[in-house]
Amino acid sequence: GAGVSQSPSNKVTEKGKDVELRCDPISGHTALYWYRQSLGQGLEFLIYFQGNSAPDKSGLPSDRFSAERTGGSVSTLTIQRTQQEDSAVYLCASSLALGVQETQYFGPGTRLLVL
Amino acid sequence: AQSVAQPEDQVNVAEGNPLTVKCTYSVSGNPYLFWYVQYPNRGLQFLLKYITGDNLVKGSYGFEAEFNKSQTSFHLKKPSALVSDSALYFCAVRDIGGTGGFKTIFGAGTRLFVKA
């Protein structure tokens, strides 16, 4: 079946512009995660959605970052007034559920470059 | 809150030799532990996980890991390395019943080089 998809695959923007990154999780997966991976670094947790529960936003680095998940499916990560330090690969993952079925399936990522 | 450490930035091993990639963790509750692999120009892929039960977990591509609660470790192992195992490996932990909420924390990654 289809995996996690993300769009765009690459985004180049100018400092100060807003960007929107999209994630389509695997159908039926209730949990959705956003991470950031800077060059040569590990994954930095950003935000987590589970079903209809309030999201865990504790990893968002500043109030310029926000995310929403509409209808329990597609998610959009928005970065306002982008800065050069926002340049990274943004990864989305989904999992069927928590607990025993808690395996995250990752999308290919969106590579963001802020000039 | 939880944390995870991968003390080696890089591990070098000859093909056919056993490999170990180390991971230690810290949680306030109980851990769910995961290993993921990132091959060059490919996305992150799940390898194996410990949720409960047997401390020795077997996963994809012949990899296994042992959950050691007393040493708070979850080292990744393979009896005989292949050149195709060369990749970036991430250990991850979620803190169950502790203060970490639902977030999964990833280590910084260990780059494995297997030489022919």
Image: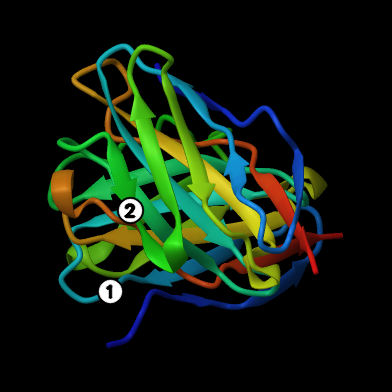
Q: Amino acid at mark 2?
A: Lys
Residue marked by disc 2: B58
Secondary structure at badge 1 equals loop
Q: Amino acid at mark 1?
A: Ile
Label 2: chain letter:
B
Image point 57% across, 68% down: which residue? Answer: A109
Assess whether mark 2 and mark 1 are in contact (beta carbons under 8 angstroms).
no
Q: Is residue B95 left or right of residue B84?
A: left
Residue marked by disc 1: A26
- Residue B114 x/y as whole percent: 74, 60
Front label number (1 vs 2) = 2
- Residue B95 x/y as whole percent: 30, 25
Image point 54% across, 72% down: which residue? Answer: A108
Q: How many marks?
A: 2
Q: Is residue B112 left or right of residue B77?
A: right
Label 1: chain letter:
A
- Residue A62 x/y as whole percent: 57, 33
- The C terminus of chain B lies in which quarter of the figure? bottom right
Figure check: A17 above or below A27: above
Q: CA distance from mark 1 to mark 2?
A: 25 Å
Q: Is residue A4 visible?
A: yes
Residue at the far right in the pictured view: A115
Q: Is residue A67 left or right of residue A32?
A: right
Q: Residues within 10 Å of mark 2 (few under 14, many from 20)?
A: some
Are dots 1 and 2 on a single chain? no
- The N terminus of chain B lies in which quarter of the figure? top left
